[in-house]
Amino acid sequence: EHIANQIAAGEVVERPASVVKELVENSIDAGATRIDVHVEEGGLEGIRVTDNGAGIEPDDLQTAFYRHATSKIGSSRDLFHITSLGFRGEALPSIAAVAKVQLTTSSGDDGLGRRIRVEGGKLVAEEDTPAPRGTDIQVKELFFNTPARLKYMKTIQTELGHVSDYMYRIALSHPEIAITLRHNENQLLKTLGNGDLLQVIAAIYGTQAAKAMLPIRAENLDFELAGFVSLPEWTRSNRNGVSTIVNGRYIRNYGLNQAIQRAYHTLLPINRYPLAVLEIKMHPSLVDVNVHPAKLEVRFSKEQELFPFVEESIHRVLRQEVL
Ligand code: ADP
Ligand code: MG
């Protein structure tokens, strides 16, 4: 009896955005180059994620819905050496415990697939079906059997905001994946998946914003910096326009944000903030990924070198432009 219980599900499935996150991370782990996300009513009515990844073998389909069946962790030491996003084997069972899930998948190019339906933790159906290579998962009536949890959901706009924030982060950190986000009948995001970060920036912030971005590229012995920063005249009234990606992962770090802000120091009016998307590559041993996989915060072991490097690199680009 390993099937997920609803109490444990609460740790993974907090709101629609957490379902989207787990499903999209699975698609990325499966090597998808295209991920389409469709949410209805902020995700409370329905969440659908379709990918063209490796798919799941028919024999593994039920197992994927059993708790810890797929755990890739042997010890806590392994936490520091994770390469795939999923490693707990908890997401699918947890989601299926508190919603009605239909998953259709095919791992080959023969058009043959398999479909499974799990509702409230119970296996309802499993059958062969035609399907393209990849996985299509539909999650309906989230929290239908946990009314207490459902009561905590905010408005559709709030839930949608969390979903789209997450999808923007994924798109910015994966310009090589073609991503769409649709809410009800409205397309909110479409990236081409051709590796062009500026196209992703245009898709999220608009073409005008993308035109106001300056490319940046710098490196030293420890760090490699690449991305785009906005012209000083293109400023925003909030900090949400600063995105930082480390070794392909969207992260948050207060000191790094301060360094970016300082680069604009004398150039920006008070309470104005730049738009910036910066990717930094470094040896994995220099980043301390928070042990809790849901958190974005990281720490850097060489921050006294990293922060000035980032600040000066941006400042150099801005100075060239302004003078
Ligand atoms: P985890 O990602 O931690 O392994 P999940 O519960 O998220 O656990 O998924 C269980 C398993 O189901 C995964 O390990 C993977 O083998 C399979 N799986 C889930 N989603 C997909 C997908 N979109 N494409 C291919 N395989 C998938
Ligand atoms: Mg997973």
Image (spheres, rainbow, N blue to C red):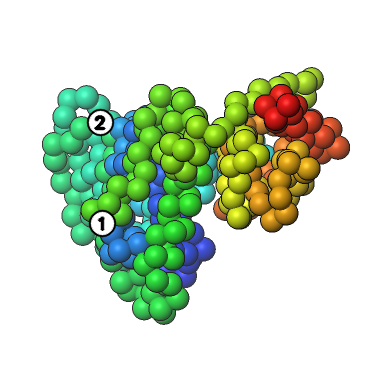
Which quadrant of the figure has residue 31? Answer: top left
Assign the C terminus to one quadrant of the image: top right
Q: Viewed as shown, does residue 129 lie left or right of 51?
A: left
> Circle 1: is it few (<14), some (14-19), or many (20+) Cα within 10 Å?
some
Q: Secondary structure at mark 1?
A: loop
Q: Nearer the viewer, mark 2 or mark 1?
A: 1
Q: Where residue 110 appears, x then y in whole percent?
A: 17, 25
Q: Which mark is residue 133?
A: 2
Tag on residue 184? 1
Residue for point 30% across, 63% down: 41
Residue 234 in which image quadrant: top right
Q: Residue 272 at x, y = what percent?
A: 66, 52
Instruction: Check mark 2 vs ligand 1: CB closer than 8 Å? yes or no.
Output: no
* Residue 118 location (% of width, % of height): 27, 58
* 298 relative to 6, above or below: above
Measured in 3D between alpha carbons, the distance from the residue under mark 2 to the one under mark 1, in whole angstroms, is: 25 Å
- 66 or 8, which is in the foreground? 8
Q: Which residue: 28% across, 59% down?
A: 40
Name the foreground residue: 13 vs 182.
182
The residue shown at (44%, 65%) is: 158
Kindly identify the amino acid type of the residue bearing the numbered disc 1: Asn
Kind of residue sitting beneath label 2: Arg
